[in-house]
Image: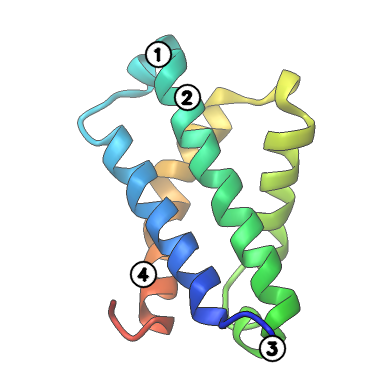
Amino acid sequence: MPPDPRKYLWDAANAAELARTFSQGQTFADYRTNAMLRAAVEREFEIIGEALNQLSKAAPEIAATIPELARIVAFRNILIHGYATVDDALVWQVLQEKLPDLERVIRALLGGD
């Protein structure tokens, strides 16, 4: 029996919430100088990308409704495989500008959970 697609959505939503919570009240300067914060945020983005990648295999029709899914998965791949060249400014920008909308889309797919 294939996994329930809601599991992947829940994992992505939870990771988005954690990344948002970790960075709340922080500035980009804080982010750049705090290795633990950077590691935590990057880890949550890795989880988001992997969960949505798995969703695309388990339920492609649901995954197709998530804007920029391929870019999200590619971002995850950069964080994991290109860890030595991660651009902190880019991660911060995605966190601030893209993550809120993604989280809203995922939560809507979960029915407002």
Q: Give the CA separation, mark 1 to mark 4.
A: 27 Å
Residue 23's disc number: none
- Front label number (4 vs 3): 3
SS for callout 1: loop
Q: Which residue is mark 4?
A: 104
Q: Earlier in the sequence, mark 2 or mark 3?
A: 3
| Residue located at (45% from left, 31% from top) | 40
10 Å crowding of disc 3: few (<14), some (14-19), many (20+): few
SS for callout 2: helix
- Front label number (1 vs 3): 3
Do residues under tags 2 and 1 come within 8 Å of each other at their CB atoms?
yes
- Identity of the amino acid at label 4? Arg
Determine whether, in the image, residue 70 is placed left or right of residue 10: right
- Identity of the amino acid at label 1? Asn
Whole-percent x, y for residue 16 in the image = 41, 53
Q: Give the CA separation, mark 2 to mark 4.
A: 23 Å
- The correct choice, above or below, for 44 with respect to 106 in the image is above
Q: Which residue is mark 3?
A: 1
Q: Which residue is mark 2?
A: 38
Outermost left residue = 25
Q: Earlier in the sequence, mark 2 or mark 4?
A: 2
Determine whether, in the image, residue 2 is placed left or right of residue 35: right
| Residue located at (69% from left, 88% from top) | 1
Rendered image quadrant of residue 3: bottom right
SS for callout 4: helix
Q: Earlier in the sequence, mark 4 or mark 3?
A: 3
| Residue located at (36% from left, 74% from top) | 107
